[in-house]
Image (cartoon, coloured by chain):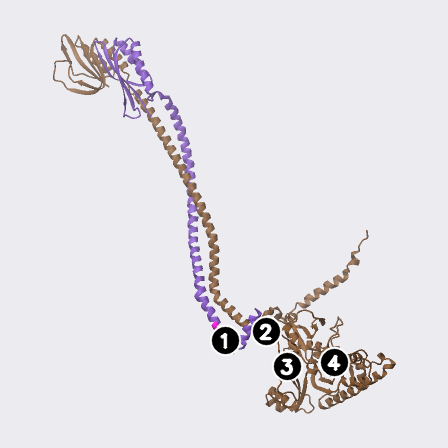
Chain colours: A brown, B purple
Amino acid sequence: MKKIDLKNVFDFSKIKDKFQKFGENCTSKFNLNSLKEFNFKKLKPSFFNKYDYDVDKIIGAKGKERFILYTKKKLIRIYRDSLAARVLLSSYIPIEHAIFYSFEVEKSVIEKVDLNNFIETKVYEEAGVDETEEYLIKYKIIDSMKDEKIVTIEIIIIPVGFIQNGYKDLLEEAGYIDYISFPAFAYKALYEEKIIKKANDVFVVFLYDKVFLTFYENGELLSILTVSGGLDKIYQALEKLKIKDFGPEMFEKLLTKKGVNSLKYGKNEKKVLDIIKEEFLSLVNIINSQIDKVTQKYNISQVERVFVISEYGNIDGLQEYIKQLINIDTFGFEFYEEYNLDRLSINPFLFLGMLEAHNAYKNGNQDYNFSLFLRKPTFFYRPSGRLFLITFGSILLTAIYPLYLYLNGLSYERENKILSEKVKSLQYINNNLNIKIRVLEARKKKIIQDRKQYTEDIKLRKELIKNVYEFKYSYIPKSSELADITLLLNKNKVYLDKLTYAVDNMVQNSVYNKKKKDVSEESFKGFVLRVFAFKDTQIPALIDDLVNSGFKVDTPGVIYENNKYKAIIRIKE
Amino acid sequence: MKELINQIDEFFYSKDEKETMVIYVLVVALIVFIGFYFIMPNAKHYRGHEYKKHKRMAIELKQLTEEKRKLSEKIIVLNKEIKNLVLEKAALKQQRDYYNELAKLLSFVVFNQKKWGEFVKNLVVNAKKEGLKVNGFTNEVFSNNKGLINKKMEISLRVRGEYKNLLYLMYRYENIKDLLRIESLDINSNKDYVIKFVLYGYEK
């Protein structure tokens, strides 16, 4: 198995360097200055901004051509998504659709008049426009005349009808166009974006029937000129050669593919090249004469660069040819070269338009925006949005207190539910406790009853035992007493006539005399003995013995009758 | 939706600033009116209802908690009491069982019709055995109101014979364990005797 050397896989020294750089970046980024530079506006949600576009992303659209420019990344790409997006949508006005007019006026005049009305009046009076048509007029006051008291006002006039109808496809798709540029004003963006350095430049556009010149002095518009007669002169001259299948398409191809580059022409084509060169020579001479005029009129010493293009695009070899003729550095219109990583075929005016749109929105300058269909502000900046905000705000403010009450109520309701659960739980617990208490009380009662029952049983048993005991031991056996009495009767020779015993004796309280009527009755418990003896001492001796034996004895008396001593002896218990 | 928003925008674009302001104020007034006239009373009522309920339930909860505490205490007390009562009951039961055992020894005092019938028969037989001639007897069962010894049977036995035999008979019966008493006695020199035996008993 092959060993993998980690050192070869990871270059640790590079990783270390990267970490160091990252650390430095972190420390350098995190300082007060960087904090000051931080754009806090970016933290604001996009719907709080008046417009939701990103000024660093611009769509350039013209017909089917659609590109998107990322100014920060310096990148341009073909754009295929919806036009209605959070990026700027720009287009441009082709030069041929514009009417140019300029006039000179004293500075003192423009200070006194309402400039817009003044210019509008001038345009309608002097520029030869159709007075029945509405125009969009944009102008720039040029204060670089050699005569310092005078300024030139360069005016671009675009028929409103063109703006309304010329971008229908875009408007149908997006509903708005953020920026419609015009090339003469759009060149300024090249300096702003530092694509070209500020210098005295002339931008030359060869149109079919005219040449369009725009002069810039150190990044500021100086003059706009048109020269009548353009590529049409070359076309007409070539037409005379009666080349087979010659037409506008061949003409365009000829100019863009071969142009004035002698290396691209064969020997038999020399005549064509000569004609083209000749015609361009005359055009360049006119341009050069215009340059001279401008340098004479305005405060500039010389034109330093020429940027040239045709309505068909770049004409091969033309830049070198012009430089050769007028001895001024001449360049093409490939300003987007740095942005065009995909090597796309880009319309330079569309690129200029995107660049200008970016600049205009970045700097908040809409002076040269020809769009009549600007993007609507974001929802909250529109009347409907305001109405929504007012409605929502009012609802919110009105609802705050009821909402507080409701939420408070809701909170109470929630707590009530918890309390209700607790109450139910406690009620359940208390019920159970009550049941438990009832059970315990019943148990207690039962125990008390049992205890009472036990106590009563014990009492009853005790009483029964006591009663039985008392019954048993409170009774003197009568047989025993009778035996004792009988013994004492025998001892004392006393004879028993009759003996009764009763617990409730009713005894005649009389002596032993049946005849005696004077008797009383007495109730008592005990023995009643009717006895007789033959000696007078025998009955008393018996009584004495009975008393001595513990008997309670009494007698109503002893009588002597029929030679017998008789007596009734009562022995009480 | 987008169309509606656009229509609203267009509507306001057609109004001047003053009109727009009036519309905004009217909207605000309408919302405030609805809020204060319709929503507020309901919210107040709802909150008030829930608040009162909360207060009531809090009091109820407090009362129930207090009740629970009291009930728990009562249960503890009851358990203690029951524990003591159980101990007492156990002690009493022991005591009762003891007395029950004692009382069982006194089973002879319990009134028993059959036993008492036999007693009468035996009395007559035993009188004869003692050499006495039985001239007659009566017996009658009464309720006795005096305490637990609540039953009595009076047997009047008329016999004739030797006095000593009478004494033997009396002695014999007075020494049995039953609750017997001689409550009346009539002896004369003619050797005719009347003895009233009373047998006492306990009827539950």
Chain holding disc 4: A
Q: Amino acid at mark 2?
A: Pro
Q: In the picture, which quadrant includes the C terminus of chain A?
A: top left
The Cα–Cα distance between marks 1 and 2, rounded to whole angstroms, is 20 Å
> Percent from the top left, x then y, of residue B44?
44, 62
Output the chain of dot 1: B
Q: Residues within 10 Å of mark 4 (few under 14, many from 20)?
A: some
Q: Kindly check if marks 3 and 1 are in contact, taking CB atoms under 8 A apart as contact.
A: no
The type of residue carrying mark 3 is Gly
In primary-sequence order, the first of circles 2 and 3 is 3
- The spot of residue B202 in percent (x, y) is 32, 23
Q: Which residue is mark 1?
A: B21
Mark 3 Cα-neighbour bin, 10 Å: few <14, some 14–19, many ≥20: few
Label 2 to label 3: alpha-carbon separation: 24 Å
Residue where numbered disc 4 is placed: A311
Compared to residue A82, the image places residue A548 above or below, namely above
Q: Which x, y percent locates residue A215?
A: 72, 85
Circle 3 marks a residue in which chain? Answer: A
Dot 2, crowdedness within 10 Å: few (<14), some or many (≥20)?
A: some
Q: Are marks 4 and 1 in contact (CB under 8 Å)?
A: no
Q: Secondary structure at mark 2?
A: loop
Query: On the same chain: label 4 and label 3?
Result: yes
Is there CB contact under 8 Å for labels 4 and 3? no
Name the residue beneath numbered marker 3.
A161
Q: Which residue is mark 2?
A: A377
Q: What kind of residue is marked 1?
A: Met
